[in-house]
Image (tube, rainbow, N blue to C red):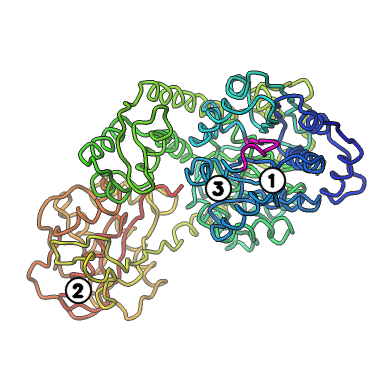
Amino acid sequence: MNYDPKRALELLQIGSGRDDAIFREGQEDAIRHIVEGKGRLLVVQKTGWGKSFVYFIATKLLREAGKGPSLLISPLLALMRNQIVAAERMGVRAAAINSDNFSDWANIERSLIAGELDILLISPERLANERFSTKVLASVADQIAMLVIDETHCISDWGHDFRPHYRLLERIVKTLPPNLRLLATTATANNRVMEDLVAVLGPKLDVSRGDLNRTSLSLQTIRLPSQAERLAWLAEQLSTLEGHGIIYTLTVRDAQLVTAWLMFRGFNVKTYTGATAENRETLENELLDNKVKALVATAALGMGYDKPDLAFVIHYQRTGSVVEYYQQVGRAGRALESAYGVLLSGEEEVNIGDWFINSAFPTRQEVAYVLEALEEAPEGLTLNDLLMRVNLSMARIEKTIALLSLESPAPIVNDGKYWQLTAARLSEDFWARAERLTALRRVEQQQMHDYVDLPYGGHMRYLVSALDGDTNAVTTPVLPPLSTVVNAELVQAAIKFLQSAIHAIQPRKQWPQGGLPKYGINAQLGPRSIAKEHQAQPGRALCVWGDAGWGGKVKRGKYHDGKFSDELVIACVDMIKGWSPQPKPAWVTCVPSLRHPFLVPNFAKRLAEALELPFFMVIAKTDERPEQKKMANIVQQVRNIDGSLELNGQPVSHGPVLLVDDMVDSRWTLTVSAWLLRKGGSGDVWPLALSQTGYDA
């Protein structure tokens, strides 16, 4: 098929909305290669280069020549809205099937089969769906003109962002007809990943690799161990930094914290995480239109988001790998002469990084638990059945069954509802791969540790070298470094903010499926709602475990001193004054513990004295149970608490009560305690905990 350069340029100018637009180096060559059918092509180009223009223009040219539609596989469908808009300007009829548009699936599938679509965008998980592959894809497979694999580094388990379902593509690619046009694109492929991709996508794979250097980016690293120091630095620098940007955090909780602090200091910022899915498009557009100073985001705002004039990207903590950092900081300065990329390094990032590494693969014990449960149920088990039988979180079970089911041969399969064992046994190759990749993640973690210690001016060279790029074109930063000195008054203000931050304890309003049989609560036969008159009221936690506000003092009191300090009593009194629950508590009680029988009662008594309220110990433990934090999912948590608490026979005061505990995790202990108190005749129950626990990543 002949390539029309005039028409290709016209499409670029229409899609970009610029009459003077010209192709970047390598773009037109890639389009020509695909259109003329010269073989499979891997395009490795830095973020912002315009990979989407390559496959959308190629699609349009192929369709105008009478060829069939293209199929694009990408993990970024929710972040490709602006690219799809550009495609539609060129007259490319594009549609996506993803979890956000379930109601449109049937119409989109019909349009594809009828030849009314030019390109269909799907996730790798959708490709794994048996109904889609057999009912939809099979009917148009012989018509597909081009297969595009976006973010193709996800195929390689050497890559920083390996996606298990991308492993299916390795099998699919091997069955493709040799003349089918295949385009693979990525911004992050070092030599190790490239070798892997060539092996998977070959045998004859041409590679177009561009320059990784970003002359517009001025990179800097600053060690500020405490949260308060970093919050203070952000507040000071954001007041003078020009333009708009992104502030990345490792966890959802930190994103919410940084947002709250900056809003408290008067900045127009908003949070963008996986938990804000329903508002993602609105938030993306607000930053695109410069309606917010910055989005405070987790990695949920990553590959696929394009704001060419982004003036800064700041990291609140270091990322887990050089590749991940290059991807995220590369959002800045795409169409600017200069932009800042600043990485702040804090003391908690090592623990968070370890948590991500350790949770990336199931352990041998976790796999054994799942396989043993399935072996005991030849008829198969649903996900809920597994939750009841295995003390693992839903996320851990889902990860385990996903990875096992993608092995070849797979030791487990799903028939649409039930998971069942197959005759295959899990290969030791699975564990070898897990161990190899865990070791790699440790190396990547050390690389980022080393990156933090680099002098100003050495960062871009380090990144390009780590990605196996050419460092000869690396130049010195355009912008001067930002101050590394933190305003002491702002640090104190940040500490006070952390100490006064509101950590709400939302009451549970429903019993779980199965109820609490030992308490006579059967949620399978009756309504699952907890009667309103038996629910706890919204509560408060003083801090997050180990944080820079009160978290360290709570941790020290529990595990070092064996007693919570008077300072924490005063802090709780101040919190209650600001909270001002109505009707006011008339007395105080606490959750009992056989493991630490005096720790919480001692604190609750002193708190009651400070509040000038009576303290009555009216709840007792019936027997020793594991700590709730060791119960990994809701079913196990409820079973663990069922029947473990009871009223001890002491009179229950009829007034509103402050219910005190040291830690809140699953909230079931507080839920059952409040239910017992209300049934025993108390007034409103106001939960108060010293600390919330766990990472929310």
Of the residues tagged 3 and 1, which is closer to the observer? 1
Q: Which segment did they paint magenta?
A: 140-151
Residue where numbered disc 2 is placed: 614
Dot 1 falls on a residue whose secondary structure is: strand
For disc 3, the marked residue is: 298
Q: Nearer the viewer, mark 2 or mark 3?
A: 3
Are the two marked residues, 1 and 2, in contact with CB atoms closer than 8 angstroms?
no
Q: Quadrant of the N terminus?
A: top right
Position of 173 relative to 340 (above/below) = above
Going from the N terminus, do you reach mark 1 or mark 2 first?
Answer: 1
Q: CA distance from mark 1 to mark 2?
A: 70 Å
Q: Is residue 598 left or right of residue 281?
A: left
In this rendering, the label closer to the viewer, 1 or 2: 1
Percent x, y of residue 644: 14, 57
Q: Residues within 10 Å of mark 2 (few under 14, many from 20)?
A: few
Instruction: From the viewer's perspective, tell me whether residue 461 is left or right of residue 555.
Output: right
Amino acid, disc 1: Ile
Viewer-side residue, 624 vs 317: 624
Q: Position of residue 435 (x, y in %)?
A: 41, 23
Q: Is residue 259 left or right of residue 242?
A: left
Q: Mark 1 highlights which residue?
A: 119
Real-space CA distance between mark 2 and mark 3, rounded to the nearest whole angstrom: 45 Å
Residue 690 percent location from the top left of the image: 32, 58
Quadrant of residue 313 within the rendered picture:
top right
